[in-house]
Amino acid sequence: MFAEIAFLLYVGHLLADYPFQTDHQAGCKAEVGRKGWAANLAHAGTHLLTCGVLLAIGSLTLGWHLPLIPAAAAVLWIGATHSIIDRRWPVTRWMNAARQAGWAERGGAAHVDQTAHITALAAAALYLAA
């Protein structure tokens, strides 16, 4: 069951991060102030909704019996971690601590960002499958 949950959450992540993310959200989600937080929370909400819908579809079609409260907690975890990671400072701090400034300048931050997101999804999938 872990593999199926993880796969659906990953598909939800890709949908929410690429075709469902607006230009405004992508450009403003890390800004300081109300505008940045509004874009960030709207984008995180897209992740909540998309992953929640896919978990519901998985439950209906694959016969999962996911308890509602743990499933809601997992989806909230995905939204919250996505919001924090997308503020960009966690990735910057990680790359500075790991002495990856050169890689960051050559586009590495996007890879570290996605790795952080997928790690959070894997944790949610493990939690639900346990």
Image: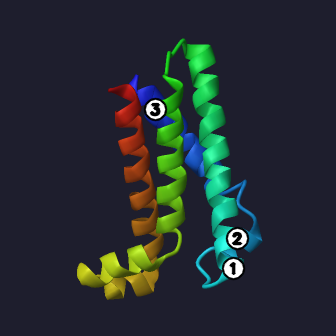
Corner quadrant of residue 60:
top right
Give the distance between the C-alpha atoms of the residues marked 2 and 3, in whole angstroms: 27 Å
The residue where tag 1 is placed is 34
Q: From this viewpoint, is residue 108 visible?
A: no
Amino acid residing under circle 2: Ala
Q: Which of 26 and 101 is in front in this view?
A: 26
Q: Quadrant of the C terminus?
A: top left
Looking at this view, name the residue that lies furthest to the top: 63
Mark 1 surroundings within 10 Å by alpha-carbon count, few (fewer than 14), some (14 through 19), many (20 or more): few
The residue where tag 2 is placed is 38
Q: Is mark 3 on a helix, strand or loop?
A: helix
Q: Is mark 1 on a helix, strand or loop?
A: helix
Amino acid residing under circle 1: Arg
Note whether 101 is above or below 128 in the view shown. Answer: below
Mark with earlier residue (2, 3):
2
Amino acid residing under circle 3: Pro
Q: In which quarter of the image is the N terminus?
A: top left
Mark 2 surroundings within 10 Å by alpha-carbon count, few (fewer than 14), some (14 through 19), many (20 or more): some
Point 62% across, 26% down: residue? 56
In the rendered structure, are the residues bearing label 1 and label 2 in contact, judged by CB atoms less than 8 Å apart?
yes
Mark 3 surroundings within 10 Å by alpha-carbon count, few (fewer than 14), some (14 through 19), many (20 or more): few
Q: Can you give x and y, in whole percent of width and height, for residue 93 in the image? A: 34, 80
The residue where tag 3 is placed is 70
Corner quadrant of residue 8:
top right
Q: Can you give x and y, in whole percent of width and height, for residue 82 in the image? A: 51, 59
Give the distance between the C-alpha atoms of the residues marked 1 and 2, in whole angstroms: 6 Å
Point 46% across, 58% down: residue? 81
Q: Can you give x and y, in whole percent of width and height, for residue 63 in the image? A: 54, 11
Residue 33 lies left or right of residue 103; in this view the side is right
Give the distance between the C-alpha atoms of the residues marked 1 and 3, in whole angstroms: 31 Å
